[in-house]
Image (cartoon, rainbow, N blue to C red):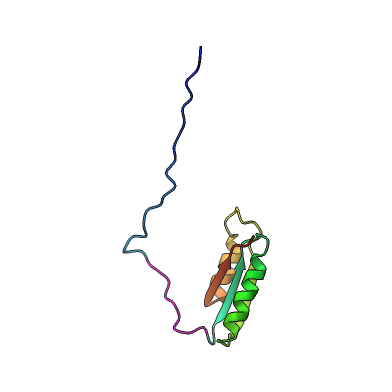
């Protein structure tokens, strides 16, 4: 006698961002801004951010930089890092390596 196996099919799509959602305002320039660089913990994510920073710093003069690594790509960013970067940074750039 064979037993029937059930297979659950998941839908990986997400709903589009609703029109009433709040999107962060983008600065008109990065000059004079504090830039946050947040690596996701994957190999080479810090190197990617360093390269992006170097390219941007050729065109903009930043007032400061905050560099953090969330440490684990499969986990959400720890709240203290998010709070610190939200308080100190005008713009945050993230990267996923490999």
* Residue found farthest to the left: 19
Does the magenta run of residues contain 49?
A: no
Q: Which residue shows up at 46% across the image and 27% down it?
A: 6
Tell me: 16 left or right of 78.
Answer: left
Predominant SS along the magenta part: loop
Q: Nearer the viewer, residue 15 or 65?
A: 15
In percent of width and height, residue 92 lies at 54, 72
Q: Which residue shows up at 61% across the image and 56% down it?
A: 73
Does the magenta run of residues contain 29?
A: yes
Q: Quadrant of residue 26?
A: bottom left
In percent of width and height, residue 17 lies at 37, 60
Q: Quadrant of the C terminus?
A: bottom right
Report how many numbered discs are placed on residues in the image. Answer: 0
Q: Which residue shows up at 54% across the image and 83% down it?
A: 33
Vertical order, 84 against 1 (above or below): below
Tell me: 32 left or right of 98.
Answer: left
Q: Quadrant of residue 72?
A: bottom right
Q: Nearer the viewer, residue 80 or 75?
A: 75
In percent of width and height, residue 50 lies at 65, 74
Query: Which residues, given as a range, are shown in magenta?
Result: 22-30
Tell me: 11 left or right of 39.
Answer: left
Q: Which residue shows up at 47% across the image and 31% down it?
A: 7
Q: Nearer the viewer, residue 51 or 77?
A: 51
In percent of width and height, residue 18 lies at 33, 60
Vertical order, 62 against 38 (above or below): below
Vertical order, 42 against 34 (above or below): above
């Amino acid at each position: 006698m064979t037993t029937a196996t059930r297979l659950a099919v998941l839908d990986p799509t997400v709903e589009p961002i609703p029109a009433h959602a709040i999107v962060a305002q983008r600065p008109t320039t990065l000059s004079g801004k504090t830039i946050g660089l947040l690596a996701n913990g994957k190999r080479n994510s810090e190197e990617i951010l360093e390269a992006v920073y170097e390219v941007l710093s050729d065109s903009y003069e930043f007032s400061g930089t905050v560099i953090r690594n969330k440490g684990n790509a499969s986990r959400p960013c720890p709240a203290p890092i998010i709070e610190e970067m939200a308080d100190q940074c005008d713009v945050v750039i993230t990267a996923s390596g490999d």
